[in-house]
Image: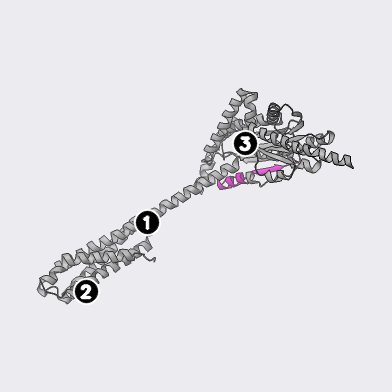
Amino acid sequence: MNLIIIEDESIAARRLKKMVQELDPAFNVIALLDSIEKSVKWLQDNPGPDLILLDIELVDGQSFEIFSQVEVQCPVIFTTAYDEYAIKAFKINSIDYLLKPIQEKELAQSLQKFRNLKKVFADKQPVQVNFEALL
Amino acid sequence: MKKLNDTRFRIIGMLIQNLIFFLFFYLKQVVVRGEPLWKVVAWQVLFVAVIWECVRFVIRISRHRYPGLGLIRPRIIYLALLLTLLAVVVGSWHVWMELWLGFWLEEQHDIYNYLYSIGMTLFFSQLIAGIYEATYYLDQWKKSVLRTDELEKRTLQSQLDSLKNQVSPHFLFNSLNSLTALVEEDPKRAVRFIEELSAIYRYLLQSNEQELTTLARELEFMDAYSYLLKTRFEEGFSITKEIESVHYEYLIPPLTLQILVENAIKHNMVSESKPLHIRIYSDEANNLIVVNNLQKRKTYVPSSKTGLMNISAKYSLLNQPPIVVNESNSHFQVIVPLITNQRHELNHNRR
């Protein structure tokens, strides 16, 4: 599973990466990005990741901007020190909203939630495939 | 003049005084001299009522003229004078009335009757006035304590508000987040980070009580503050200070620098590819200047201008020259006048 981390403080980004890898080695952190500009470019140039860990206040603005510039299919886990954006975050494919300082336990729960949701959708997938095959 | 609101006190007080008068002064008139009971009682009720009403009137005049806790001395003196005058008039009237009522024989009538009567009236009117004054004083005192409490509460509230506004809570949470990373990565730096963080919060709490602080202390605080920012943003943030040492003892409202630096970070991009440089220096005209390269964030940052407005407001409250804000295409600059000790005291006294 490919994951990208968008976070403007590199020390915080490094810790997130480390935590994710320790919690579940199946996750592959393929990019660390710190601005809207870089994130948009990366998302345009690369195949979509499976999950995004996303900070809200980035170097060049708020990360909500990314979603207006590029279409993002995958789920998002928000990580931020601000609790006032939860409603706004809800409108995007967010599956969780983690407040800084990020607790390992909470991150573990979010990742579990992601796996559960993925499983639900994966289970439905064959039905759709069969349906198409029948046609 | 205000009403006294003393109905209960007045009725009970008059009853007690009547009782005292009857037992100690008028019982003799009924038992020994055989005066009719109704006549004696009617007279003493009238007399007591006259004393009370006169005293109440005098109390009301004195409170109207010298109200409140602060004017207690002039009020008491004024009250004493009026009460003496009252005692002479009412006391004399008392003797005259009793003569007319036939409680005294003509041949007993001399100056000592008057002195006795005036003395008695003075004694009772002072007693009554004393109780009124004591309750009034107590009441005023209670009110003033409540007012002081209220004022203290408000001051505390406003201090708390300014504390909350001065340093956004996100600063704390972001710092704690960096700290958790640092603890694993570099425990030594984490320890230093904690030390600086606590220095920052100690300064925040202390400085709130002061109007002004020295530039030296403010710069010391900036060292701790910029250490934290440097840890968080690494190469994305730098700060240089070029302050003439003569300016170290000049004064400045606390947290002015912090507000300016926080503003710069809030409105500008801070990253390794687009580093933010802040330069703090002083000039010959005793100004402190904070300048940063302008690289505004693309998305609109809601700005209430509270930070700059707070600084401006403080300067005008302190009767100091205003701060100057300059914005060019490439730089943002704020010029803050440094305050000398004399200038501050002078302006303080003038207020």
Residue type indicated by callout 1: Asp
Q: Quadrant of residue A81?
A: top right
User: Can you give x and y, in whole percent of width and height, for residue A77 in the image?
Assistant: 71, 37
* Amino acid tagged 3: Phe
Q: Residue at x 32, y 57 (%)?
A: B134
The quarter of the picture where residue B343 lies is: top right
For the view shown, which residue lies furthest in the front direction?
A: A134
Considering the numbered disc 1 on the image, is that residue within a helix, a strand or a loop?
A: helix
Q: Nearer the viewer, residue B283 or B50?
A: B50
Q: Position of residue B133 (x, y in %)?
A: 32, 59
Residue B322 is inside the magenta segment: yes
- Residue wearing tag 3: B173
Evaluate whether residue A121 shows in this view: yes
* Of residues A22 and B297, the one drawn nearer to the viewer in this rendering: A22
Chain ID of residue with mark 2: B
Where does label 1 land, which residue?
Answer: B139
Look at the numbered disc 3 and give the secondary structure of its residue: helix
Coordinates of residue B174 in the picture (x, y in percent): 64, 35
Q: The magenta stretch spans which residues?
A: B309-329
Residue B42: assigned label: 2
For marks 2 and 3, give the CA distance.
82 Å
> In the rendered structure, the residue with mark 1 lies on which chain?
B
Write the residue at 30% across / 68% down: B53
Please tell me how crowded label 2 is: few (under 14), some (14-19), or many (20+) other residues with Cα within 10 Å. few
